[in-house]
Image (cartoon, rainbow, N blue to C red):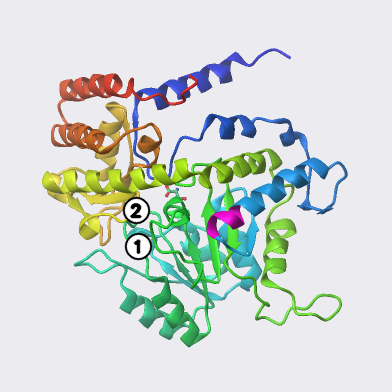
Amino acid sequence: MQRDTVIFNLIQQELERQRRGIELIASENFTSMQVMQAMGNVMTNKYAEGYPGRRYYGGCEIVDQTEQIAIDRLKQIFNIEYANVQPHSGAQANAALMLAILQPGDAILGLDLSMGGHLTHGSAVNFSGKLYQPHFYGVEKETGLIDYNMLEAQARKVKPKLIICGASAYSRDIDYKRIRNVANEIGALVLADIAHPAGLIAKGLLSSPFEYCHFVTSTTHKTLRGPRGGVIMMGKDFENPFGQTDNKGNIKMMSNLIDMAVFPGTQGGPLEHVIAAKAIAFGEILSDEFTVYMKQVKQNAQVMAQEFVSLGYNIISGGTDNHLMLIDLRNKDISGKKAERVLGEADITANKNMVPFDDKSAFITSGIRFGVAAITTRGMKENDMKFVVSVIDKVITQSDDSSVIAKVKAEVNDYMAQFKLYPEW
Ligand code: DSN
């Protein structure tokens, strides 16, 4: 077989793009070399439908071990009873979890996408909004914080079977206890989708949802810095409240329902090469080095937010508790769409984002979202945040001057040359 130079050239170009730019997409990160190597291994050849020790294919003795190590390490990270590491992505994790506990048409309550929520929390264009009956809560206009009064009022009014907390563009901690209290009152289950802040939660730098939420889902590639994928977890396993029994008449545990909802419910063969990479990433998360990394992420985000505020930028909620921030650009007279484009021309990558109560569409938006997990992996510290904010400000305030953008791009490329993407390269 001839080497596919077309594709390998494109991969090389992507490596160069990642190396020369400032990566600020809040949902991205740079895996370690060993995590990346594990994603390209022979386990991609293996079919392993089922779970360790109970597969539908022969020859699974070795992938059984990698998958079990991934499960055990994830349980150790969060000190929990149950983990399923097979979901191919965060969306798949949420789809499986909902399949396990909901019937089509059941009411669900989540944070509105336009207020920082996620597509899989009930958006009309997503399975969650098509199969189930979605209802939403938002954030307070004055503070940008989750409107817990609205959440409680909605919960009492629509009596959802599932309340979903967690967000894609929300920079503050979440009051899981308050959400659980209202869920108890109306008999709802609670899912925390911690895809964004999982790494901070793993290291105790944000509140843990496990005590209060029945279920927790996450991606593995954001602050957890692993391969692209998803997981489903429970702090404590419990008997399913729907009365489902096994063939001996015993009430099935929730873990059983969730495992069945992942496979065969929503997925076929697990990606065992990716699960091997998840196991490696989870091992890295257990290290002290990762604690240092996560603390730096939090510190960098706070310095970045302060720098933006000092230059007159309007950060939703006024700051950040986690790795990201959402900026309302309306006082800077530029849309999110244009800001994303001109920053991209200067090799600064970010994404446009609606802000709460936005008057522009999701294609234009008034906001932009920045996250620091990826640049912190590259070794950036507090002082570097000042450089990053200064170049962003130059581009945003002089967005129509192509000579400024070209100059900033050269500055960015020069600055980033000191931070290796991978120590070995
Ligand atoms: N698309 C991801 C994000 O950027 O936050 C969430 O799925």
The answer to which of 296 and 317 lies nearer the viewer is: 296
Q: Which residue is drawn at the image coordinates 64% and 63% (left, top)?
A: 82
Residue 424 visible from this viewpoint: yes
Q: Is mark 2 within 8 Å of ligand 1?
A: no
Local packing at callout 2 (Cα closer than 10 Å; few below 14, some 14-19, many 20+) is many
Q: Which residue carries the number 1 mark?
A: 173
Task: Please say if 192 is above or below 223.
Answer: below
Instruction: Check whether the beta carbons of the residues at disc 1 and disc 2 lie within 8 A of each other.
Output: yes
- Residue 237 is situated, as x and y percent measured from the top left of the image, at 64, 71
Q: Which residues are magenta?
A: 74-78
The answer to which of 147 and 341 lies nearer the viewer is: 147
Q: Which residue is drawn at the image coordinates 81% and 75% (left, top)?
A: 246
Q: Amino acid at mark 2?
A: Asn
Q: Is residue 63 left or right of residue 213?
A: right
- Residue 74 is situated, as x and y percent measured from the top left of the image, at 59, 53
- Say what secondary structure mark 2 lies in: loop
The answer to which of 139 and 179 lies nearer the viewer is: 179
The answer to which of 56 and 290 lies nearer the viewer is: 290
Q: Which residue carries the number 2 mark?
A: 322
Q: Earlier in the sequence, mark 1 or mark 2?
A: 1
Local packing at callout 1 (Cα closer than 10 Å; few below 14, some 14-19, many 20+) is some
Q: Is residue 97 magenta?
A: no
- Magenta-colored segment: predominant secondary structure: helix
Q: Which residue is drawn at the image coordinates 13% and 49% (left, top)?
A: 331
- Residue 383 is situated, as x and y percent measured from the top left of the image, at 22, 35
Label 1, label 2: how many angstroms apart (C-alpha)?
Answer: 7 Å
Locate the N terminus by quadrant: top right
